[in-house]
Image (cartoon, helix red, strand yellow):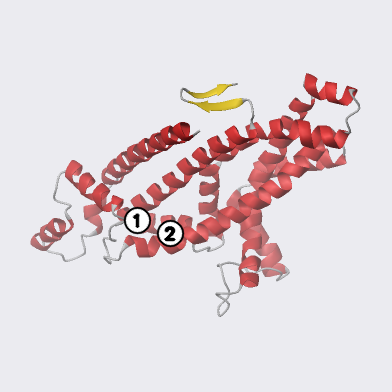
Amino acid sequence: MTEYLIRRLLQSVLVIFLITIVTFLLIHAAPGGPTQVMLAPGLSPEAFEQQKRNMGLDQPIPVQYVRWIGDLLQGDLGYTFKNHLPVGDLLWPRIGNTLILMGAAWLLTLVIALPWGIYNSTKEYGLSDQTASFISYLGFAMPTFWFGILLQQWLSLGLDWFPLSDMHSRGKEGSIADLFMHLVLPVTVLSLGFLASYIKYARASMLEVLEQDYIRTARAKGVKERKVVFRHALRNALIPIITILGLDLPLLVGGAALTENVFNWPGMGRLYVEMATAREYSVLMAITIVTAVVVVLGSLLADILYAIVDPRVKLGGKGTKAA
């Protein structure tokens, strides 16, 4: 187990390193490039060249990358080009806000989708199953930004049940209740698409397991249906769902970015859009790296949970293999 985790961690570090290279090259290949952001109207060529030297942008790309990755490893994310503000001061508060939104959406999805999908596998084609199918089709077809605007018009402006946008009301920044009220609409929007997927995944995975021979044997021996479902079938049914959890992290991050902009949520996705408009490349690189780390760690967590849930898997010296 320890050897497997070390190997996966090393692989994750390599993936993140390659992402830093690709991100750095793409940013510098973008139209205009970082130097054009500093080119203020009326700035003389001499002053412009001096500013480039001060920020190290006159060096070759490989030298700039080595300096940037060295600072990154020391926790220095750099400075914005226009105002020369520390990127970390802009980014770190936003990361926590995004994690709150993503975590709440993910938790709501799992709490609703897994029990519902499991129940529908035992009541195939019943009313609950048909209702879940309708919600699934709705979730797949509904554009995130349009659904968010629709909820704002209906539940905020029309019925005044929930706040229209932002993370806190003015003067209530420390209130958990106020935060919860602001979370309801964006979490609902962000959860809908994933709810549609996971209900289907849970139902299909459970149906496949319930058709296995050992389940038929358990039923033939007179084991109660509740025990058959939750003790014998559930653990194996969770295996493909756990795998999908890790793979869906990039989609969750992308959905959070759209949702944050619709609801003016002060998170990392909204910051990314703002900084892309302002062409603040140092901030964009930092956000990309942080997102990559979150996705890679999610994939690693999915591998660990996969091994814990499936007793047939051994994490030996040669990798994951069937026992």
Front position in the image: 8 or 152: 8
Which residue is rendered at x = 49% and y = 64% of the image? 266
Give the left or right position of residue 211, taking residue 243 as reference: right
Total count of labels: 2
Q: Amino acid at mark 1?
A: Val
Q: Which residue is mark 1?
A: 283
Please tell me whether residue 152 is drawn above or below residue 170 in the rendered image. above
Secondary structure beneath dot 1 equals: helix
Secondary structure beneath dot 2 equals: helix
Please tell me whether residue 73 is drawn above or below residue 216 in the rendered image. below
On the image, the x and y values in percent for residue 110 come to 68, 46
Few, some or many residues within 10 Å of mark 2 (<14, 14–19, 20+):
many
Q: Amino acid at mark 2?
A: Leu
On the image, the x and y values in percent for residue 101 come to 57, 57
**Disc 1 and disc 2 in contact, CB within 8 angstroms:** yes
Please tell me whether residue 112 is drawn above or below residue 214 in the rendered image. below
* Corner quadrant of residue 93: bottom left
Front position in the image: 150 or 133: 133
Q: In this view of the protein, can residue 295 be seen by the observer?
A: yes
Please tell me whether residue 168 is drawn above or below residue 237 in the rendered image. below
| Sequence-wise first label, 1 or 2 | 2
Q: Which residue is mark 2?
A: 271
Residue lying at the far top of the rendered structure: 213
